[in-house]
Amino acid sequence: MSTSETAPNEANDSIESVPAPVAQDAQAPESRADKDVPLKSWLGMGASTRIRRWQRNLQKIAAWEPLLIKENNEEIRKRSLALRYRAKSGESLASLMPEAYALVREAGRRTLGMRHYQVQMIGGMALHEGCISEMQTGEGKTLTATLPLYLHSLLGKGSHLATVNDYLAKRDAEWMTPLFRTLGVSVGIVQTECDQGQRREAYNSDITYGTAKEFGFDFLRDRLLLRAQNRVQSDFLGDGESNFSGGGGDKPVMRGVHFCLVDEADSILIDEARTPLIIGSIEDQVREQIVQTYLWAARHAPEFVENEHFEINPDTKQIELIGRGRQQVRSLPRPDLIRTVGLVDLYEFMERGIKVHQEFFLDRHYVVRDDEIVIVDEFTGRLAEGRKWRDGIHQAIEAKEGMEISVPTGQAARITIQDLFLRYKYLAGMTGTAATSAPELKKIYRTPVVRVPTNRPPQRIPLKDLVFGDMHSKFVAIVDEVVEMNRLGRPVLIGTRSIDKSELLSQMLEDKGIKHEVLNANKVAEEAAIVEEAGKRGRVTVATNMAGRGTDIKVPKDVEAEGGIHVICTELHDSARVDRQLIGRCGRQGDQGSYRQYLSLDDDILKNGYGPVKAARWKQLGADSGSSFQSYAAMFRKAQQKVERKHFRDRMVLLHHERERKKMQRELGQDPYLDTPD
């Protein structure tokens, strides 16, 4: 999905050996080493057309700098307004890019004291051409994003930046607003608590920051409103102009979907791709009967025994009652209110209750907050605000925890994350970990991945993986390593897969007298503050998957000189990209750092990759034997690859079914987003 009028459809490029520009004082831009670097090492036998084009654009951008430096803020603003006029008059964005990017770089230098590095300019060019820019952690993706966002805002159709949560959307927007204001560009922020008027104002801004979830729900709400007014005419809500601006509450809030830049693209476009966004319809029939049936199933689910009453499909994880289990259901006492519920329905309620009892755990898969069940995202470790499990799982968990049960609703409107972003005319993304998913991103979203080099050569040191028989012995070894690093004064960041494991490790550190911070989904508000302090001398931070993703860790000079941050990975995640993201917390911007992966034979990845039978065998081996388990290290990576392939197949199946469903509904004259069966 190219955003350049001239960009050819090329294969993924990897730019590995880029001359690092010398870091310069923001107040002295005229003396820069990278200004005249010929970048010949980028070219050579087999170099792509894309890279040669970027080479020419870098030279054009550099040629603008001596002129822009001499101009005052008012003259800079006039130049920006002139670019907007030219863009709306029909000049291609590709031809305007050099001057536009030079303006953004100069505005950043003046307002933020940050001048875009040469590699950031390359990242910005890749984003303009509809690529996923893989930029290592700490390389300044937030600043890089200002380049394509500004360029596309010139058309007056709106530029969106989608990120993973409200905090990052608000932080990045407020951080970059002075830069955009200098160029005469307005910035809006869409937050969960925003009302319709605030949302409409945000979308009518030149650039809008928000989350994928909010963009998706606003699209669905607008579509429902337009249907009620008999105004749904096409798949696009307007052509991207300010068609629906105004203060009326009966008007859509969005003005179209033109350009979207997806931050943390791997997390949003891949990990969350299977998550549908659903607006429920009100359903009040037999509410009390449904509530009582959930409570009845939750109360009796612990009485059912695997292989005696039910079986678990190792591939689908589905619970299915067998003969004795169905007999047990029929023999259970039932309140008068649910005596009229059919047996088939009772079996389904009980299977759901057993599944929740067996597989969904408090402080691992969900937390209880403000008398509500809040999902913990399995990939990021963050709370997935506003999301619910489907097929009655969420209600079964509410019954299990003895909370008020939200009766399942029908669907008034539905869209998947995949479909949402495929609706944008132009799409691009940024992340630190996309190369391993490059084929999938290009196949689904038509966004090739470009690996942008680091500004300074990385000095991250990998230490040998260590394998243990069980989690306890692994955690004991981890605590010992933390004690040693703490003695040396080096900060330590420990990554865990779940909240309960982070709490367990925290207790073990406390028993050893190690002062530390715990960063998990229960501490959303303090996340940024904890992460920013994690690089100080002697700091120990225990974190779930999120590990402050999107937040910079400051490492003092004296700490960096002694080896920098040491990252301990306590367990492999289902996706190697999550592990890479955690590892990327050390060795940022050429700093020193190190990391080590710890493994044990009872890790979840073995069960997820090889199935429960083999996993149980290895778990028993770890419990019985006191010998070394280092020879088993390779099988953990293979298990991870198996899980990644399974998730990839699941996403491909979802994409196929969604396309077929929409095709069928269009043939029937239905709206694929509103006429969706539950």
Image: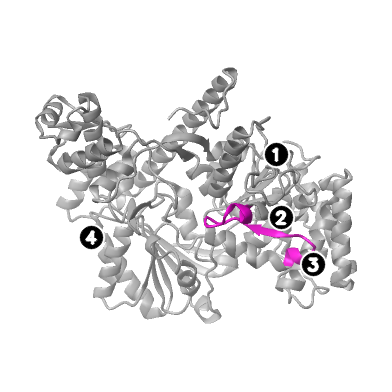
Q: Secondary structure at mark 2?
A: loop
Q: Residue beneath label 3, please?
A: 106
Front residue (pair 42, 640): 640
Q: Amino acid at mark 3?
A: Glu
Which of disc 2 and disc 4 is earlier in sequence?
A: 2
- Examine the rendered structure and indicate whether residue 175 appears above or below residue 580: below
The extreme bottom residue here reads 558
Would you say 160 lies left or right of 458 here? right
Residue 205 is tagged as: 2
Residue 113 sits in which quadrant?
A: bottom right
Q: Amino acid at mark 4?
A: His
Q: Which contiguous range is marked in magenta?
A: 179-199
- Mark 3–mark 4 distance (CA, rounded to whole Å): 54 Å
Is 399 included in the stretch rendered in magenta? no
- Examine the rendered structure and indicate whether residue 536 appears above or below residue 104: below
Q: Residue beneath label 1, please?
A: 425
Quadrant of the snapshot with the C terminus: top left
Which of disc 1 and disc 3 is earlier in sequence?
A: 3
Q: Position of residue 615 (x, y in %)?
A: 25, 42
Which of disc 3 and disc 2 is earlier in sequence?
A: 3
Going 60% across and 55% down the picture, which residue do you hit? 190
Q: Residue beneath label 4, please?
A: 472
- Mark 1–mark 2 distance (CA, rounded to whole Å): 18 Å
- Mark 4–mark 2 distance (CA, rounded to whole Å): 53 Å
Residue 490 is tagged as: none
Residue 65 visible in the current orientation:
no
Q: Nearer the viewer, mark 3 or mark 4?
A: 3
Which of disc 4 and disc 3 is earlier in sequence?
A: 3
Q: Position of residue 465 (x, y in %)?
A: 37, 57
- Mark 3–mark 1 distance (CA, rounded to whole Å): 29 Å
Q: Secondary structure at mark 1?
A: loop
